[in-house]
Amino acid sequence: MIDKMKPLTKAEEEIMQVLWQLGKANVKQVIAELPKPKPAYNTVSTIVRILESKGFVDYEKQGKGHIYFPLIKKQDYSNQSLTTLMDNYFQGSFKSMVSFFMKKNDISLNELEAVLKEIDKEEK
């Protein structure tokens, strides 16, 4: 994993979500998975090349085209994004972040208990 991944724009993250889902894909296959209105081929191709320059994807040649695949695992990106969110908005406090989301989303005690059980299960 890269120590400090470059942040992704919303468009880049949307393309990465498709690549994480598919595993490998050419630009046309990525476009097919995107919601309507579909972006232009050149737009998606440009974003994929940006993702390549940021170290998120690589490709293998297939005929005249390229098949792109993620170099960064979705879990690694999610972990860093969550850490960045926690550091930038909650002074690095997990407790503050959870408290914020509980208040904002009106989480019940049962839901919180389920989350804590899930965390406990992951730690074991």
Image: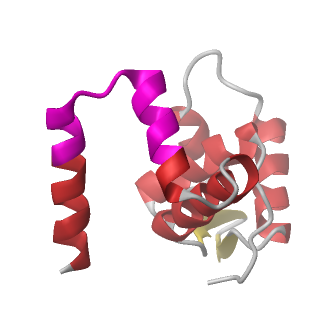
Residue 80 can be seen, yes or no: yes
Q: Residue 44: where, in percent of width, then height?
A: 75, 42
Does 3 appear above or below 115? below
Residue 103 within the segment the image draws in magenta? yes
Q: State how the image is colored.
A: secondary structure
Q: Residue at x 82, y 37 (%)?
A: 43
Quadrant occupied by the C terminus: bottom left
Residue 18 can be seen, yes or no: no
Q: Residue 96: where, in percent of width, then height?
A: 54, 47
Q: Residue at x 50, y 63 (%)?
A: 74
Magenta residues? Answer: 97-113
Magenta-highlighted stretch: main secondary structure? helix
Could you say which quadrant of the image residue 34 lies in? top right
In this rendering, position of residue 23 left or right of residue 41: left
Residue 32 within the segment the image draws in magenta? no
Q: Residue furthest top?
A: 37
Q: Residue at x 52, y 35 (%)?
A: 100
Does 28 appear above or below 57? above
Does 31 appear above or below 13? above
Out of 2 and 57, give the one closest to the viewer. 2
Quadrant occupied by the N terminus: bottom right
In this rendering, position of residue 8 left or right of residue 117: right
In this rendering, position of residue 21 left or right of residue 56: left
Q: Residue at x 82, y 59 (%)?
A: 49
Could you say which quadrant of the image residue 82 lies in? bottom right
Q: Residue 15: where, in percent of width, then height?
A: 63, 46
